[in-house]
Image (cartoon, helix red, strand yellow):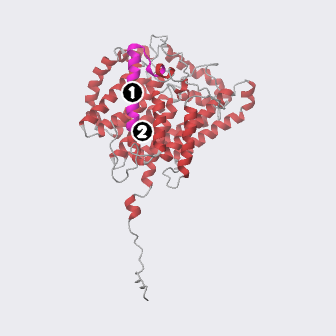
Amino acid sequence: MSPPAPSPVDTDVWPHTQRAMPWALAGFLTMVWLVPFDSITLPVSLPLDAKLDRPILIGMAGLWVLSLMGKNAVSRLRLSPVHWALLAFVIIAMVSLILNDATIVRLNEMNLPMRKLALLFSYVLLFVIVASSVKPAEVRYLTILMVSLASVTAIGALVEYRTGYNAFFTWSEHLVPTVRPGELGAIDSIGRKSIIGPTIHPLAVAMMMSLSLPFALMGFLSSTERRTKILYALATILMIAAAFGTQRKTSVVAPAFGMMILLAYRPSAARRLLPIGVGLLVMVHLVAPGALGGVSDQLKPGNLFGVMSTKDRQSDYPAIKPDFIQHPILGRGYESYDQKKYRILDNQYLTTIIGVGILGVLSYLAIFGSILLLAHRMTRSQDPKRAGPAIAAAAAIASLVVGSSLLDVFALPQLPYLIMFIGGLVVVSAQADTAPSPAVAAAPSMAPVAPLRPRRLAAD
């Protein structure tokens, strides 16, 4: 799935470019997929957590500012509904902390929301950088990179499932100080192995595969070359096998909603995807024996509501009722509810409504709704190179909206970074429609042209 060379119209397109910003973004995306950055604390002094992603993002932000100031700058600020939705969420988060600061300080709980707020700024910063520095022609190539990286992560997760060897943490420990999470190598109460890949929890791996899977499927459907179709098909099989290897119900529920969106835009794709479905059942059983059966057993009616993880989620609703009744509009303060101290919720909507209330939940959904609307507009594009990624982005967003009810998205930083990256690419593609094409910009004006006067000769 190596990216093809750009068309002769614009040769300054990543990866065939010397511009620093797209390379920096590609490097950051590689870190998100392959490096356990949230388990790495650098020996440097920063105002908050010195996790690996923070200094890298700060350096990338400085590079981005320089790219905006350049004489022949490609980067430019593109405001969109997604920008305003993110701004609204940030403002609500800050206001909720300001209004509840006395209580939070008295309970000695201000450190956590400050760290989480800084992380929220990091997510928004990544989105702004992507949306303002990527060329529309580069969107397709960056999605190819994401599918390739997801395939590598899937292979690592499958190796971990078969052997217990986690290459991501093992290699990182040789380079930088890395703290192994408690989930690594653990077995939960119903006998499921914790397959965490480069993250801190199996749910992160399952959801990461759900976000990248639609891009692999659309690549398979839109490709005309046999070799490329085979590579996309293998990537699809690896992603689904890795998701099933986590043995979490999320690995089925979230991608299923994404597939529904994809098939709603491309109903004829069901017939073309059937060969993948048949091969998938065989390949999943070969590369992750027992994973498919383990997940399907959990989805049986007798087990769906009987396992401890489901019972815990059911008991979360009455448990948060007192907090919600006391602070229904703006919550008790953004991320001030310490789940290690009070209760693990595993539900982003519950976490959000406690922290920032009803307004926070509405603004959280507005972020995804604005991305979906922009992607929906792009799905009608006559250019398949732009319509395909837009459909995939819409499916990925849908899977995350559903997945937010099954896990705490903001507790797993890989997920917000990926959705901000995808959202930024959608903004780039959508706003390219409103820009005049080179042909239109170069077209001659219909206004009357003054007749040319003959030049006087020097001898005159």
Residue 4's quadrant in the figure? top left
Return the mark for residue 336.
none
Q: Position of residue 409 (x, y in %)?
A: 52, 29
Number of the front mark, 2 or 1: 1
Three-letter code, disc 1: Val
In percent of the image, x 25 and y 39: which residue is there?
A: 225
- CB within 8 Å, label 2 to label 1: no
Up/down of 178 relative to 363, above or below = above
Residue 20 seen in render:
yes
Q: Which residue is at the front of the view, 203 or 70? A: 70
Query: Closer to the camera, 285 or 51?
Result: 51
The spot of residue 286 in percent (x, y) is 30, 17
Residue 357 at least partly seen? no
Q: Quadrant of residue 123?
A: top right
- Looking at the image, residue 217 sits to the left or right of residue 30; the answer is left
Tell me what residue is drawn at x 58 percent, y 20 percent.
344
The verdict on residue 425 being magenta is: no
What is the magenta segment's predominant secondary structure?
Answer: helix
Q: Residue at x 48, y 39 (%)?
A: 25
User: Which quadrant is home to the C terminus?
Assistant: bottom left
What distance separates the C-alpha of mark 2 from that of mark 1? 20 Å
Q: Is 136 placed above or below 263 here? A: below
Q: Which mark is residue 152?
A: 1
Q: Secondary structure at mark 1?
A: helix
Badge 2: residue crowd in 10 Å (few <14, some 14–19, many ≥20): many
Q: Secondary structure at mark 2?
A: helix
* Amino acid, disc 2: Ala
Range of the magenta residues? 142-169
Residue marked by disc 2: 393
Furthest-front residue in view? 459
Taking the spot 42% from the left edge, 19% from the top edge, the residue there is 246
